[in-house]
Amino acid sequence: MPKRILSGTVTSDANEQTVTVLVERRFKHPLLHKTVRKSKKYRAHDEKNAFKVGDSVRIIECAPKSKTKRWEVLEA
């Protein structure tokens, strides 16, 4: 099964080798036919601490790195 790739914005880089990425998705409501925006935060592994708050990044699924990290940063 292919690994999922998501794109989002870095909202926090306070922890060592970890960034928090906010991923927003848009979809049409099935009944109201209105565009709905939902967002979710993912903790991603950033080996070199290269990314700062506000950067746009792509993250990819990986094996668990810690209790909360299941993603790693692919590129900017």
Image (cartoon, grey):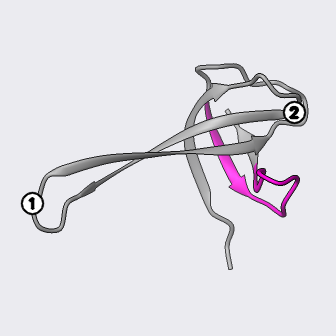
Rendered view: 1 above or below 13? below
Residue at left offset 62%, top offset 24%: 55
Residue at left offset 76%, top offset 56%: 70
User: Where is residue 2 shown, x and y percent of the image?
Assistant: 67, 73
Name the residue beneath numbered marker 1.
Answer: 32
Residue 65 in the magenta stretch? The answer is yes
Rendered view: 64 above or below 73? below
Name the residue beneath numbered marker 2.
Answer: 17
Question: Dot 1: what SS?
Answer: loop
Instruction: Tell me if 26 is positioned left or right of 65 in this view.
Output: left
Instruction: Tell me if 49 is positioned left or right of 55 in this view.
Output: right
User: Where is residue 62 shown, x and y percent of the image?
Assistant: 79, 60
> Hey, which residue is sitting farthest front in the picture?
67
Residue 76 in the magenta stretch? The answer is no
Span shown in magenta: 56-71
Q: Quadrant of residue 31?
A: bottom left
Rendered view: 12 above or below 37? above
